[in-house]
Image (cartoon, rainbow, N blue to C red):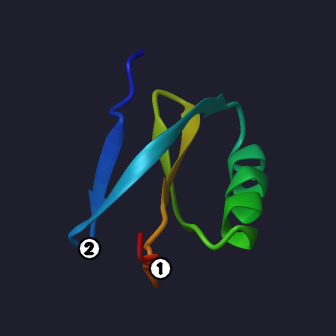
Amino acid sequence: MSPSLSLLHDEKKFMWDGCLYATQQEAADAGKAYQNDNFEVQVAEEEGKFLVYTRKVVKEVVVTAQ
């Protein structure tokens, strides 16, 4: 099994977290942890395993003068 490293959903790109989860509940728990860190999360099933894809949008860019 070689999961896709990225996933497009609603024209947004999500990146795989690199872990294979045995159950949907394990994937949901991992996804909840990412959501608590302000990530958008998508869970996908592939060949009986669950994958978590995440996306974080930069909301503000701070530029410091040099």
* Residue 11 sits in quarter: bottom left
The CA span between labels 1 and 2 is 28 Å
Would residue 66 appear left or right of 17 to someone viewing this image?
A: left
* Residue 63 sits in quarter: bottom left
Look at the numbered discs 1 and 2 and tell me whether their residues touch, using CB distance below 8 Å: no
Question: Residue 30, percent across and down?
Answer: 73, 51
Lower sequence index among marks 1 and 2 = 2
Question: Residue 46, percent across and down?
Answer: 44, 34
From the image, tell me which residue sits under label 2.
Answer: 10
View extreme (top): residue: 1
Residue placed most toward the observer, 12 or 47: 12
From the image, tell me which residue sits under label 1.
Answer: 62
View extreme (bottom): residue: 60
> Measuring 68% from the left and 60% from the top, which residue is drawn there?
34
Q: Residues within 10 Å of mark 2 (few under 14, many from 20)?
A: few
Would residue 29 appear left or right of 18 to someone viewing this image?
A: right
> Measuring 41% from the left and 47% from the top, which residue is drawn there?
15
Q: Residues within 10 Å of mark 1 (few under 14, many from 20)?
A: few
Q: Amino acid at mark 2?
A: Asp
Q: Amino acid at mark 1?
A: Val
Up-down: is 18 above or below 6? Answer: above
Quadrant of image for the C terminus: bottom left
Q: Secondary structure at mark 2?
A: loop
